[in-house]
């Protein structure tokens, strides 16, 4: 008969291993995931003649200069939220750039094996790499963009806080330049075909929504493992000591 001590130990260590494995695979893309039809479309971009305006974030004033009306629908492959409390954004007084979000669209979202790639965001960049030559050839680099999201809207910040890899999002607003009065301005790319420094889109976000989210077996197993881990810890501390010695 399985002893209480052995049962608790198996639950604890088994859930701990499953927790680690499921966490490391949590962002694997589901090949059968439903893709919103709009993800197939190219971003919409139209020139505008809008005056610059001033906005405020964390008690700092910024000037925003709209250049193009812009709407992007894509699949999130990587992102990085920025904090007011540390990092380069705090050092540079950049509290309006709430996140960088890297997305793909078109055939990249539907025909390419995204699990063959690694995607990650730095402070200002999105990087991707693969060892699969076939996947690399099938990937269209003009259908990926890293987007500096700037906003003063609490509703947009709430959406950013909920964001996860595998989400399908629609972002609308303006491609824009911004900066503090009297200081340098951060520019924006206006084409999807450029690369390197300055190739990211800077979007003043007027509206943002999550059109669909990814649910995978690994994410479900993560929460299951976490629940079992908690149960095993509770059992350890609530089971009489003499029973754990059996």
Image (cartoon, helix red, strand yellow):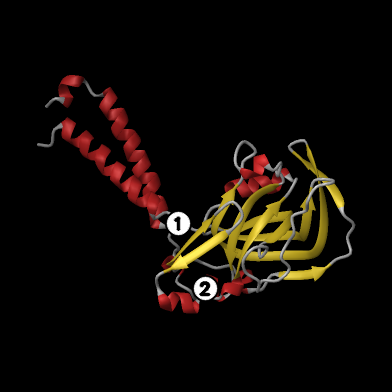
Crowd tier of the residue under label 2, counting other residues whose Cα lies within 10 Å: few below 14, some 14–19, many 20 or above: some
Residue 151, percent across and down?
73, 49
Q: On the picture, is 52 further left or further right than 164?
A: right
- Residue at the far left in the pictured view: 1
Q: Which residue is painted at 15% across and 20% down in the image?
A: 242
Q: Which residue is painted at 65% across and 38% down in the image?
A: 84
Q: On the picture, is 92 further left or further right than 68?
A: left
Q: On the picture, is 41 further left or further right than 218?
A: right
Crowd tier of the residue under label 1, counting other residues whose Cα lies within 10 Å: few below 14, some 14–19, many 20 or above: some
Residue 207, percent across and down?
73, 55
Q: Tell me the number on the disc at residue 78.
A: none
Q: Name the quarter where the N terminus is drawn.
A: top left
Q: Nearer the viewer, residue 200 or 81?
A: 200
Image quadrant assignment for residue 12: top left
Q: Tally the marks.
A: 2
Image quadrant assignment for residue 94: top right
Q: Which residue is painted at 54% across and 70% down in the image?
A: 109
Q: Is residue 44 above or below residue 240?
A: below
Label 1, secondary structure: give it: loop
Q: How far is mark 2 from mark 1, CA to CA?
A: 16 Å
Q: Which residue is painted at 21% across and 39% down in the image?
A: 10
Q: Is residue 111 above or below residue 152?
A: below
- Please give the residue where the numbered disc 2 appears in the rendered image: 110
Q: Name the quarter where the C terminus is drawn.
A: top left
Label 2, secondary structure: give it: helix
Q: Nearer the viewer, residue 70 or 117?
A: 117
Q: Tell me the number on the disc at residue 27.
A: 1
Residue 240, percent across and down?
21, 20
Image quadrant assignment for residue 124: bottom right
């Amino acid at each position: 008969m399985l002893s209480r001590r052995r049962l608790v130990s198996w639950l604890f260590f088994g859930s701990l291993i499953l927790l680690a494995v499921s966490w490391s695979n949590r962002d694997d893309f589901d090949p059968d995931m439903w893709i919103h039809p709009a993800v197939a479309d190219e971003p919409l971009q139209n020139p505008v003649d809008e005056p610059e305006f001033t906005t405020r974030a964390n008690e700092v004033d910024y000037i925003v200069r709209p250049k193009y009306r812009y709407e992007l629908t894509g699949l999130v492959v990587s992102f990085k939220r920025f904090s007011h409390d540390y990092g380069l954004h705090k050092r540079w007084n950049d509290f309006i750039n709430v996140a960088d979000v890297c997305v793909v669209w078109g055939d990249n979202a539907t025909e390419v094996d995204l699990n063959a790639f690694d995607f990650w965001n730095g402070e200002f960049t999105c990087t991707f790499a693969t060892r699969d030559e076939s996947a690399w050839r099938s990937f269209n680099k003009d259908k990926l963009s890293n987007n500096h999201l700037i906003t003063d809207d609490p509703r947009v910040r709430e959406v950013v806080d909920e964001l996860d890899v595998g989400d399908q999002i629609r972002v609308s607003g303006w491609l824009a330049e911004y900066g503090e009065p009297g200081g340098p301005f951060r520019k924006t790319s206006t084409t999807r075909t450029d690369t390197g420094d300055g190739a990211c889109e800077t979007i003043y976000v007027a509206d943002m929504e999550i059109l669909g989210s990814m649910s995978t077996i690994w994410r479900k197993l993560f929460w299951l493992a976490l629940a079992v881990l908690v149960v095993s810890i509770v059992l350890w501390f609530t089971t009489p000591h003499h029973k754990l010695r059996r």
